[in-house]
Image: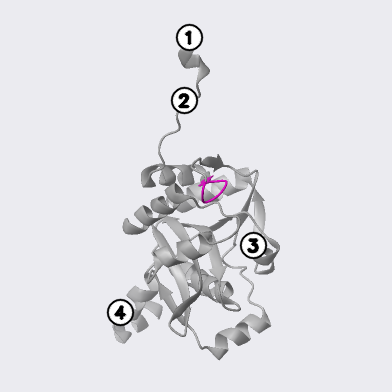
Amino acid sequence: MAHDMFTPARPALTPELMIRAYAAGIFPMSDGAQHDSIFWVDPQRRGVFPLDRFHVSRSLRRRLRQGGFEIAVNRDFAGVVTACADRDETWINADIFSTYMALHALGQAHSVEVWMDGALAGGVFGVTLGAAFFGESMFSRRTDGSKLALVHLVERLRMGGFQLFDTQFTTGHLESLGAIEVPRADYRRQLQMAISSPADFFAPERCADQPSEQRSTQTS
C-alpha cells in the first residue's frame, strides 16, 4: 500500500481558501520568507481589539495633533506588505504574499498608510470579511508610524460598522493600546456574528462624498 506511506499534498493557498479558513477561525503562516511550506494556526487564546476600548495615550494624542503626516488607504498596499515582511523573522513567504495581493485585487485586503515627506513612514494591513477585520501586520519606519496608522484604522472600522478586529495574537505593545486575549470559543462566537453582518471599510470616503445637507439629515 505505497500510497499510505505519503502525506497527502496540502491544497494550494488561494484567496478562496484563505477566506474559508478565516471564516472558520484559522489563518496561515510560514516559517520564513524563504520557506515554501505553510501551516495553519488556530490559537487557544485569540488576540482582539475591542473597538470601544482602544486606548490612545496622551503622548499619542499630542502626536496626532502635531500633524506632519498624511493618512492614505490602499495607495501602496504592496509596499505595506513588503515592509511588514522585511524583517529578520517573518511569517510572510511568497505564496502568502501573492495571496494577499490577490485578495487586495478582489477588494478584501486593505492597507492604512502613514506618509511623511513623500515616503511610507508606517502602516497596517488586513483582510475584511463581513464586519470582521483580520489585522495581519504593521510596521514603522518613523517614530509612531504604526501607532498613527492603527488609530486611523480603528476610527475607520468604527465608522464602517465593524464588530471584530482580530489581531491573531497579542503583544505588550498591542496590549498597551487596548488589545486583549479571549478564549477560542468566545472568539468563534464573535467571529460568526461578525462575518454574517454587513460593514463598509470605505464609510469615511462615502460620508465625505455626501452633500453636507444630506449628512446633517442623517445625523439629526
The residue that label 3 is drawn on is: 179
Q: Where is mark 2, residue-wise? A: 8
Which of 61/99 is in front? 99
* Quadrant containing the C terminus in the rendered view: bottom left
For the image, the number of numbered tags is 4
**Magenta span:** 28-34
In this view, the residue in front, 72 or 13, is 13
Q: Is residue 83 magenta?
A: no
> Quick one: SS at disc 2?
loop
Residue 48 in the image: above or below residue 121: above
Amino acid beneath label 4:
Asp
- Residue 131 seen from this side: no
**Depth-wise, is mark 4 or mark 1 nearer the camera?**
1
Which tag is nearer the camera, tag 2 or tag 3?
2
Q: Amino acid at mark 2?
A: Pro
**Residue wearing tag 4:** 209
Residue occupying the point 40% across, 63% down: 78
Q: Give me the residue at 40% from left, 71% from top.
A: 73
Residue 214 horizontal/vertical position (percent): 30, 81
Residue depicted at x 61% and y 47%: 186
Amino acid type at image mark 1: Met
> Of the residues under marks 2 and 4, which one precedes in the sequence?
2
In the displayed structure image, the side of residue 30 where residue 205 appears, left or right: left
User: N-terminal of the two: label 4 or label 1?
Assistant: 1
The nearer-to-camera label among 2 and 4 is 2
Q: Few, some or many C-alpha atoms within 10 Å of disc 1 (few <14, some 14-19, many ≥20)?
A: few
Q: As shown in the figure, which amino acid type bears the numbered disc 3?
A: Ala
Task: Answer with mark 1 or mark 3, whichever residue precedes in sequence.
Answer: 1
Identify the residue position indicated by label 1 in the image.
1
